Each structure stands twice: as structure tokens, then as C-alpha cells.
Image (spheres, rainbow, N blue to C red):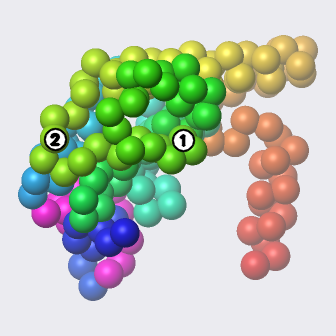
Amino acid sequence: MKKATASGMGKRGAPAKDVDAYIAGVLEPARSMLEKLRRIIKAAAPQAVEVISYHLPLYKHHGHLVAFSAFKNHCGFYVMSTRLMAAYKEELEPYEKATATVRFPIGDPIPAALVKKVVKARIKENEAHAKAWRSSLGGARPLAPGNAVSCPERAGARSAATRRG
């Protein structure tokens, strides 16, 4: 699938530095759809941190929350949870789907209520995961809401891998 433009790319093909730059690099009508997705996500998760990760606009709250992207024929909404994809299976029926991704056709309206419900459910999932992890440590280490790494062992492994290469 081809992207609507060099979405996620800034000038000369460089990755976008922020979500504004990502969206600015997308042609209409996909741009309007991404702007609406962004507004819905930010309203549902005002505490989430907005970043560019994997060349996509991504929202973090106790780990990865949701993300989005633009392609030639659809806007991708990355739920990042197969459990929630199964829980909302009936409501997601009208849309093309992948494992944890929903594809909204370009030009179709964004289902705002559904997106909001999914984002709020992802917040609950991530907060429950963070709480379980903290309690497994005896509550010794608080987890920052925007922290993508919820386990110090994984953080150490990631740091070691980064140093190697």
C-alpha cells in the first residue's frame, strides 16, 4: 500500500519531527481525517504524551496507547491490543482490519464515539498493566505516565542493545 504522500516525512524525505509536521505532509482529504483522529485521541486521553515513534504519530500513557497513519486509500488507527480488537469486533465490523489495526477509508467519516471508547479502554488496559507491574515490585517504583518502557529489565536490555549498535 502506498501512503497518501510522504506522510511521516518532512522535507527531503526526513522523518517528521512532530505530529504537526507529520500531518502537514499528508494530502487532503486524509489530512482532515488525521486532524480529526488527533482531536478525538487528545480529548479522550489528555494525559497522553504525543510523540513520533516508528515514523508514526503515537500516544503514550504507561506505554504505547494508540497511533495513526495515512495511506493512499485509508487512514490507519493502531489500537495496539488484540484483546480490544476482539472486544469491539462487532463495532469494528464495517472496517477493514488487521491484527490490532483498523483502516478507515479515505473520505469516510471517522467514527468518533468508537475511537473515543477504544482510547479510553486502552488507557484502562495500560493503567492496569502498570499497576500490576508496580505491585509485583512491592510498589517500590512509580511509573511515569508517558514512559514506554514499563519494566526496568526491558529498559536495561534496550539500553544495552542501543550501546551495541
- Res. 5 image quadrant: bottom left
Whichever of callouts 1 and 2 sits on the residue coming sooner in the sequence is 1
Which residue is disc 2 drawn over?
108
Q: Which mark is on residue 85?
A: none
Q: Is residue 27 above or below residue 48?
A: below
> Is 95 situated left or right of 61 in this image?
left
**22 shown above or below 12:** above
Q: Is mark 1 on a helix, strand or loop?
A: loop
The image quadrant where one finds the C terminus is bottom right
Q: Is residue 7 left or right of residue 60?
A: left
Label 2: which secondary element: loop
Graded by Cα atoms within 10 Å as few (under 14), some (14 to 19) or many (20 or more), the crowding at tag 1 reads some
- Expressed as whole percent of the image width and height from the top left, the position of residue 62 reads 61, 30
Instruction: Tell me which residue sits at (51%, 61%) in the image.
Output: 54
Q: In which quarter of the image is residue 140?
A: top right
Kind of residue at disc 1: Ala
Q: Position of residue 150 (x, y in %)?
A: 73, 35
The stretch drawn in magenta includes residue 15: yes
Question: Which amino acid, mark 2?
Answer: Asp
Q: Can I make out residue 21 in this image? A: no
- Which residues are drawn in magenta? 13-27
Q: Mark 1 = which residue?
A: 100
Q: In which quarter of the image is residue 97?
A: top left
Nearer the observer, 102 or 154: 102
Q: Which residue is drawn at 57% across and 26% down?
A: 86
Gap in angstroms between the C-alphas marked 1 and 2: 20 Å
| Residue 96 horizontal/vertical position (percent) | 38, 44
Give the residue at x 29% y 43%. 104
- Is 79 situated left or right of 82 in this image? left
